[in-house]
Amino acid sequence: DAKTTQPPSMDCAEGRAANLPCNHSTISGNEYVYWYRQIHSQGPQYIIHGLKNNETNEMASLIITEDRKSSTLILPHATLRDTAVYYCIAPSNYQLIWGAGTKLIIKP
Amino acid sequence: DAGVIQSPRHEVTEMGQEVTLRCKPISGHDYLFWYRQTMMRGLELLIYFNNNVPIDDSGMPEDRFSAKMPNASFSTLKIQPSEPRDSAVYFCASSLGWNTEAFFGQGTRLTVV
């Protein structure tokens, strides 16, 4: 099963780009990388996912390294409402393992 | 669609009592997941269903926990008898496929005293 590792916490200034790294060195060729976030006391919210190519949507961009061993979620212009725990997961073999995530704090 | 709907939002019960948590997935979604979240253990997958059939219940902590999905629009997670260590937030989520984005409900905060 692909296990992911993320830093436990990060700070970012409001209006700046927030770059959240994730290591998934054991990921196999057909496993997607998913990003979710959880704002305090709410259910996790889907952000973006990718396989090999970089992806962008209205919420964020996802940069996946060529060897697929790591990825970075980019929030281009962070706001205070982006303060949350961000989870990077790689579902595999019908296993869904959620790590502790990264607690991102956006500071004014 | 109103999204995934869970009830109740909060439940306080005494140890030994039966607790039933309810979930209505998004219409048309074939997969339904039950999660438990605690500070100590984070987010844990308990069980998931595909087309109303339980596929993997290896995350269910013990026989006191059971889950059913009698039809495509309703699922329950039951704890009998409940214990203080079952106190947690329980989330239900649904998705179109295994490897597609999951939509989570607002959760049920269970407190067993």
Image: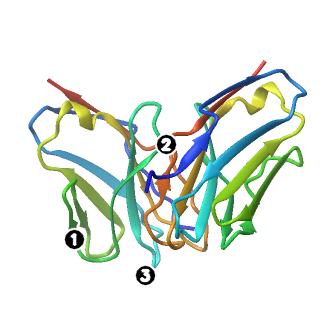
Residue type (three-letter) at the residue carrying disc 1: Asn
Residue B81, horizontal then vertical, whole percent: 90, 35
Instruction: Give how far apart the Cα atoms at labels 2 and 3 are.
Output: 24 Å
Residue B98, horizontal then vertical, whole percent: 54, 72
Can you tell which mark lies on residue B75? Answer: none
Q: Is residue B42 visible?
A: no
Q: Residue at x 47, y 60 (%)?
A: B102
Q: Is residue B26 left or right of residue B32?
A: left
Of residue A23 and residue B55, the one placed in the foreground of this image is B55
Instruction: Give how far apart the Cα atoms at labels 1 and 3 are.
Output: 15 Å
Instruction: Give how far apart the Cα atoms at labels 1 and 2 are.
Output: 24 Å
Tell me if mark 2 has few (under 14), some (14-19) or many (20+) residues whose alpha carbon lies within 10 angstroms of its own: some
Placement of B77 over or under A2, stated as above or below: above
Q: Quadrant of residue B20?
A: top right
Q: Is residue B61 left or right of residue A60?
A: right
Tell me if mark 1 has few (under 14), some (14-19) or many (20+) residues whose alpha carbon lies within 10 angstroms of its own: some
Compare marks 1 and 3 and give the one earlier in the sequence. Answer: 3
Q: Which residue is mark 1?
A: A54
Of residue B27 and residue A45, the one placed in the foreground of this image is B27
Compare marks 1 and 2 and give the one earlier in the sequence. Answer: 1
Q: Which residue is mark 2?
A: A100
Residue B15, horizontal then vertical, whole percent: 86, 23
